[in-house]
Every structure is written in C-alpha cells, then in structure tokens.
Image (cartoon, rainbow, N blue to C red):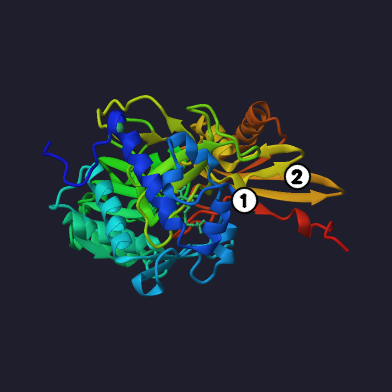
Amino acid sequence: MSAPRFLPHLPEETLAARQLAGVRRTVDQAMRNPVYRARLAAVGITSGADIASLDDVRRLPFTDVTDLRDGYPLPLLCVPERDVVRVHASSGTTGKRKILAYTRKDVETFALQMARCYELAGLTPEDRVQVAVGYGLWTAGAGFQLGSELFGALTVPVGPGNLDMQLQLLMDLKVTCLGATASMALLLAEEVERHGLRDRLALRKVIFGAEPHSLKMRRAFTEKLGLEAAYDIAGMTEMYGPGTGLNCEVGEGIHYWADLFLVEIIDPATLQPLPAGEVGEMVVTSLCKEAVPLVRYRTHDLTRLIPEPCPCGRAIPRHGHIRGRSDDMVIFRGVNIYPGQIADVLHAFPEAGGEYHIELTRSQGLDHMLLHVERATAAPADLDADLARRISDELHRRIMARIDVRLASPGSLPRTFSKAKRVTDLRLEDGERAG
Ligand code: ADP
Ligand code: ZN
C-alpha cells in the first residue's frame, strides 16, 4: 500500500497536545462572537489560555441546535461577514433549519475530510465516483464532490433520485464507487436486480451515510450490487458536512478525524460524561473551524467511543456507528425505544427483511405500536402469522414492550431517495388532542 496522502497519523502520545492547542484556538475564535463571549465569560473563561488541560473542556458551556436557529441567518459567526465564502443548510430531518457559514479555509478542510474518507475506503485516482446525494443547500453533494476532486477521482455529480439516469451513467462511465444514503443505495440495488444489470456494472464500493442503517440493509445492497465493500460515512452540517469519519476494511466502528474535532460522550439526561465505551450522546468541539467554531456542540447522535486500537493498525481513533438520535426516541407505555433497537431484534430473524416502519396510535387512552416488517425475499408468505408472533415475542423479551407485528411483501414499504423515516406517531391525532 502506498503512503497516505490525506489520512492523518494520530498516535496517543501527540494527539492530546494537538487537541489541547485546537481547543484553545477554538475558544479564542469563539470569543469573537457576542453570544459565545457572554456564555464563556459566565463560566470565567476569557481566552483560550484559560484552558489548562483537556479535562478543562468540561468547564465549557454546551451549545445546541437552538443556538444555531436563534442566530438565524448567520448564527455563531466568528469572522467578519466578508470572510464568508459559502453557506450550507441542513436537511432539516428534525424540522430545524440551520444555516452554517464557511470561510475559504473551512471549505478546504471540508474537502480534506472527505478526501480522507475516499483514501480510507481504498480508492485511487483511477476510481470513478458517482455522487447520488443531495446538492444545493445541503452539504452532502458538495462534500462528496469537493473531496473526490481533491482526491483526484473522476466525479459524476448526479444528485439523488432519477434511477434511470443513475443506472445509465453507472454503466456508461464504468463508475466504481457510489456515494448515496443507505436508502438510496437499496433502491438502486433493487432496480439493478429487477433489470438483471449487475454484470454490466463496474461498481465495487458504496460509501453510504446520512442515516442509521441496519446490517440487513447493508448486506442487501452489497449483495444485489455485487460490491467488494460498503463504507458507512458519518458527518453533519455543523462539522462542515459529510466525511467526519468512515469505517475501515477490518475494524468495527468509524475512524474519525480527531485532529479536526474532539469527541465527548455524555448522558443526555444528566449531561455528565459517561465511562469510556458506553453509549451516549456525542458532543463535539471543533479544533480548526473558522467561521462557526463548535464549542461542546450537542449532536443528539447516539454512539460510543471505541477505546481499543483498531486491528487495521491505523493510529486514528474510532467511535461506534451512529445508532440514532436521542430525539428519535419514542416513549411507548413508559418504555424508551429507539428505532435502532427494533432493527437489532429483526437482525436475528433471517425470514425478515431489513425494512421496517413503526406506527404509533392511541385509542381509549392506550398506546398501540404496530411494526410493519418486510418479509425476506425467499421467505414464504404462508408462515407470516407464526413469524409475526415470534418477532413480537422477541421484542417483548428484549425491549419489554408489547408490539404488534405485521409482515409486508418484499419491496412494499415506502422507499426514499434520501433519509428513511422509520416512525409515524399518530397518537395525538386519535382523539386526544388538547381542547
Ligand atoms: P439534519 O438531518 O439533522 O437536518 P444533517 O443533514 O446535517 O442534519 O444530517 C446530520 C445528521 O444525520 C447527523 O447528526 C446524524 O443524525 C445523521 N447521520 C449522518 N451520517 C450518519 C450515519 N453514517 N449513520 C447514522 N446517522 C447519520
Ligand atoms: Zn481500522
């Protein structure tokens, strides 16, 4: 393997010192914004020099998505407006539009973090990357393209949707790597299978992200497309966009760029740090962002740090795959349930497919949860009743909730070009609306 061009080498001995310098730089940068300045002053911090060690990061105040919305249109800006060269806005999965500003250097760092992902996925400049994620205000398309061009691969900027055109270009341009959401990759894979096009593709890798995926979903598109490998890419608009990290070829979890941001895992209820390796909410402090530095930004994403070194041997820290968001949690008859827990249970049933949808209703004061699950392609429909009962029992055993299960035909649940919506909560529409 040739020497890395973009990937960092971050051995423990030197990482802490680099991160400390980055936190100090970030605090100094944040002092340029009145909101940040007032918050930091309230905890006795007036400059980066007040941060003596990485433990002092816990003295810093949290930042949350409300701070970004409150400062609309250019929230938490820490540079003069004339230094801003670009803005992006989030896809608004949780109904919140946030606009983030970038300086020229921020755009360069964005390209670098994505180029690192292509390198970690084992691409070379001979590869051809088709970008099937959203363009425009979203960060996804811009990020996949910037990084691919910096990396030196041929880039095909298609955007999401339009399956016919996607397939045509995949075949005609002999594209080797696809960037897509897991949902979009699945849709394409099903289309390839339906038309028997697998042998006409040169596709070897998919880099997928933007939403939690189940192992079944990943296996489904990997097999249907005949891939060598599929890579889960993490990212968020607040941290430039996609590409904050990627899984490697051997290890569990996601290598992340610890020279660009510091990760803490906290208990979302108490806001206290959790012991190493426990799952909680990821809090991020950026280490070299200029326009909108992040000071202990609450991502609401659930994951854990993986303290063990990766078997691949790279000195790059890891966090787990993102299991969902703390704000996606549903409370059903007093039990907290994350969609990812349901996916975990379904994983144990080979007769079930990877696609599912949760519907919550309420009647006569009682909550009901109905789980729609697709049958696996090979499973016969006449065993549905038995399968539904077994899944329901297992859910009860593992999650302590009584959930009705209904099987659906393969491919019948809604598909999306972007992020899948796993929960429909109709409980307030069932006659219990206030007034
Ligand atoms: P939003 O969707 O909140 O409007 P973004 O478009 O910036 O904002 O999307 C970032 C969010 O998408 C992350 O905070 C995370 O919840 C989710 N996400 C991104 N990549 C992944 C991934 N690989 N796995 C799971 N979730 C992801
Ligand atoms: Zn690794």
Residue 196 visible, this orientation = no
Left or right relative to 341: residue 54 = left
Indicate the position of residue 127 as horizontal and vertical percent values. 17, 52
Left or right relative to 429: residue 65 = left
Left or right relative to 61: residue 54 = left
Q: CA distance from mark 2 to mark 1?
A: 13 Å
Foreground of the two, 211 or 237 = 237
Residue 244 visible, this orientation = yes
Which residue carries the number 1 mark?
423
Q: Quadrant of the C terminus?
A: bottom right
Please name the amino acid that badge 1 sits on. Val
Residue at disc 1, secondary structure: strand
Quadrant of ligand 2 in image: top left
As drawn, 232 above or below 71:
above
Indicate the position of residue 194 as horizontal and vertical percent values. 36, 54
Local packing at callout 2 (Cα closer than 10 Å; few below 14, some 14-19, many 20+) is some
Residue at horizontal 54 percent and vertical 65 percent from the top: 97
As drawn, 274 above or below 355:
above
Which residue carries the number 2 mark?
368
